[in-house]
Image: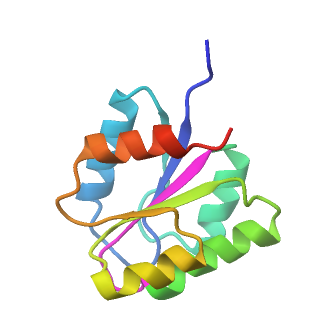
Amino acid sequence: MDKPIRVLVAKPGLDGHDRGAKMIARALRDAGMEVIYTGLRQTPEQIVAAAIQEDVDIIGMSILSGAHNHLFPKVIGLLKDQDAEDIMVIAGGVIPEDDIPALKEAGVAAIFTPGALTTEIVQFIRDNIKR
């Protein structure tokens, strides 16, 4: 039997609302993935350290605060610095359409905005996981 996909769900920055992140974490768990939820107000350094320590396959970040253009590339840069580029990064939350191309260019594999189906997120992870 294959080992389950391990996902770290993180809330970077000062964002204090985690209802969506918890909903996604539950959906991923229900789909058979192992989910580690870091809680609110995590720094990029804390997120990357937890991802490496927990040996995850994916980091999923949820943001509503508008700091995505700074925080997401910072996490990706720290993963590179730690030779952990094999950890895929996906993101969700309130992210303007105009910001999505630059975030993908920075290394975010996928961005799910409000209204995205949890089944779509699960399928993306299964189709794109690097093992």
Task: Determine whether, in the image, residue 19 is placed left or right of residue 79.
Answer: left
Residue sitting at x 23%, y 56%: 116
Furthest-left residue in this view: 115
Is residue 61 inside the magenta stretch? yes
Residue sitting at x 65%, y 44%: 130
In the rendered image, is residue 17 in sight?
yes
Residue sitting at x 62%, y 19%: 2
Q: Position of residue 63 (x, y in %)?
A: 36, 72
Is residue 17 inside the magenta stretch? no
Relative to 125, say whether 64 is above or below: below
Which quadrant of the figure contains the C terminus? top right
Relative to 89, say whether 6 is above or below: above
Q: Position of residue 125 (x, y in %)?
A: 47, 44
Relative to 84, say whether 1 is above or below: above
Q: Position of residue 52 (x, y in %)?
A: 72, 52
Task: Determine whether, in the image, residue 95 is placed left or right of residue 8.
Answer: left
Task: Determine whether, in the image, residue 53 is placed left or right of residue 41.
Answer: right
- Viewer-proximal residue, 17 or 107? 107
Q: Which residues are magenta?
A: 57-68
Relative to 109, say whether 124 is above or below: above
Q: Please say which color scheme the image uses.
A: rainbow
Q: Position of residue 84 (x, y in %)?
A: 76, 58
